[in-house]
Image (cartoon, helix red, strand yellow):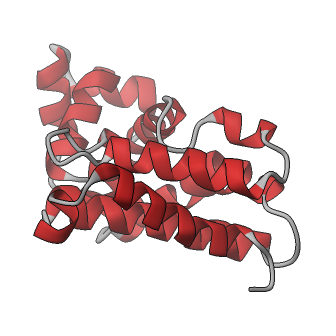
């Protein structure tokens, strides 16, 4: 059921999918989906939680880097440039966010899950004041590059040399990681 729901939400977003469609994709009844998850909203929350738990651009290792600004910026920029390769497929979590953000219910769930999965990992790794705000700005930069490089396919980003792009993105992350800049 979760696989069917993830595929459906990735393809059409929260508002574009019904429980019946998810149930059909899973080979079960809508009643069974509702019995397990209670509501479409709860099912969406579970799908987002499971999807964001998978290794991605912000892996669990960032919390072990301490306050090594250079290592953190390098790690995230390398993972981001690799994950947004123009020949790759956008990550499910990103597509679910992109296609569901216009729904107030989905946006609230996404906000909670992004805080729990990403902001929660980033904040302790960022030294100094306003770490939470800087973590959110890092998430915005990640989402923005994913959008512009993989979805919009800006030629300057899709055609950029990956090593050069990685260095440019790393410089931006350094600005966000270092406090009071």
Q: In the rendered image, is residue 79 in sight? A: yes
Q: Residue 128 location in percent, x, y?
A: 88, 72
Q: Residue at x 49, y 39 (%)?
A: 52
Report the side of 84 relative to 55 (left or right).
Answer: left
The quarter in which the N terminus is drawn is top left
Outermost residue toward the top in this view: 27
Q: Residue 32 location in percent, x, y?
A: 31, 20
Report the side of 136 relative to 64 (left or right).
Answer: left
Q: Residue at x 23, y 67 (%)?
A: 148
Q: Residue at x 76, y 72 (%)?
A: 178
Report the side of 134 relative to 22 (left or right).
Answer: right
The quarter in which the C terminus is drawn is bottom right
User: In this rendering, is residue 54 above or below 63?
Assistant: above
Q: Residue 29 location in percent, x, y?
A: 19, 20
Between residue 100 and residue 93, name the one nearer to us. Answer: 93
Q: Residue 25 location in percent, x, y?
A: 13, 23
Q: Residue at x 69, y 76 (%)?
A: 133
Q: Quadrant of residue 16?
A: bottom left
Between residue 133 and residue 65, name the one nearer to us. Answer: 65
Between residue 89 and residue 40, name the one nearer to us. Answer: 89
Between residue 40 and residue 60, name the one nearer to us. Answer: 60
Q: In the rendered image, is residue 18 in sight? A: no
Report the side of 129 relative to 34 (left or right).
Answer: right
């Amino acid at each position: 059921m979760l696989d069917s729901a993830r595929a459906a939400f990735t393809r059409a977003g929260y508002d574009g999918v019904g429980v019946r469609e998810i149930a059909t994709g899973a080979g079960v009844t809508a009643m069974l989906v509702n019995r397990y998850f209670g509501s479409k909203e709860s099912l969406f929350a579970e799908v987002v939680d499971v999807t964001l738990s998978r290794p991605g651009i912000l892996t669990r290792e960032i919390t072990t880097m301490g306050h090594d600004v250079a290592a953190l910026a390098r790690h995230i920029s390398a993972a981001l440039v690799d994950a947004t390769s123009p020949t790759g497929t956008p990550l499910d979590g990103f597509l679910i966010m992109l296609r569901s953000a216009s729904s107030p219910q989905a946006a609230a769930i996404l906000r909670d899950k992004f805080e729990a999965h990403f902001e929660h990992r980033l904040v302790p790794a960022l030294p100094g004041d306003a770490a939470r705000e800087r973590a959110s700005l890092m998430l915005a930069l990640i989402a923005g590059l994913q959008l512009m490089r993989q979805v919009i396919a800006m030629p300057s980003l899709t055609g950029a040399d990956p090593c050069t792009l990685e260095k440019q993105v790393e410089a931006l992350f350094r600005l966000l990681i270092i406090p009071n800049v």
